[in-house]
Image (cartoon, rainbow, N blue to C red):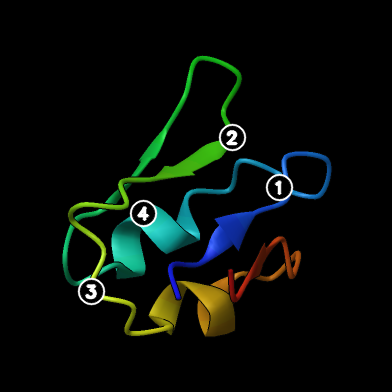
Amino acid sequence: MIPVVDRNECTGCGICVDDCPAAAITMDDADIAVIDKDACTDCGICISSCPAEAITEG
């Protein structure tokens, strides 16, 4: 399942953007992580790298 970002928990640090090997994560205008479901390979790296635990399995 594709990871999901909790918009209330995301701090906008950008670590997930840097760590995503598929370049499937960007930051929106509010500095909240957005995962491109078509580009995501469901590797789970973003889940483990998020210090705010804002990304979980979908």
Going by the numbered disc 2, the residue's amino acid type is Ile
Q: CA distance from mark 1 to mark 4?
A: 12 Å
Residue that badge 4 annotates: 17
Quote the CA–CA distance across marks 1 and 3.
21 Å
CA neighbours of label 3 inside 10 A, class few (<14), some (14 to 19), many (20+): some
**Contact (CB < 8 A) between labels 1 and 3?**
no
Give the number of marks.
4
Q: Are marks 1 and 4 in contact (CB under 8 Å)?
A: no
Q: Nearer the viewer, mark 2 or mark 3?
A: 3
Q: Earlier in the sequence, mark 1 or mark 4?
A: 1
**Left or right: 51 as drawn, with respect to 44:** right
Instruction: Give whichever of discs 2 and 1 has the lower sequence position.
Output: 1
Looking at the rendered structure, which numbered label has been put on residue 10? 1
Q: Quadrant of residue 41?
A: bottom left
Q: Disc 3 designates what residue?
A: 41
Q: CA distance from mark 2 to mark 1?
A: 6 Å
Q: Quadrant of the C terminus?
A: bottom right
Q: Amino acid at mark 3?
A: Thr
Sequence order check, earlier mark of 1 and 3:
1
Q: Position of residue 9 (x, y in %)?
A: 81, 49
Q: Which mark is residue 32?
A: 2
The reply to whether the C-beta atoms of the residues labelled 2 and 1 are less than 8 Å apart is yes
Q: Secondary structure at mark 1?
A: loop
Q: Tag 4 or tag 2, which sits nearer the N-term?
A: 4
- Amino acid type of disc 4? Val
Q: Residues within 10 Å of mark 1 (few under 14, many from 20)?
A: some
Q: Are marks 2 and 4 in contact (CB under 8 Å)?
A: no
Q: Where is residue 45? Give x, y as percent.
A: 41, 82
Where disc 3 sits, the SS reads: loop
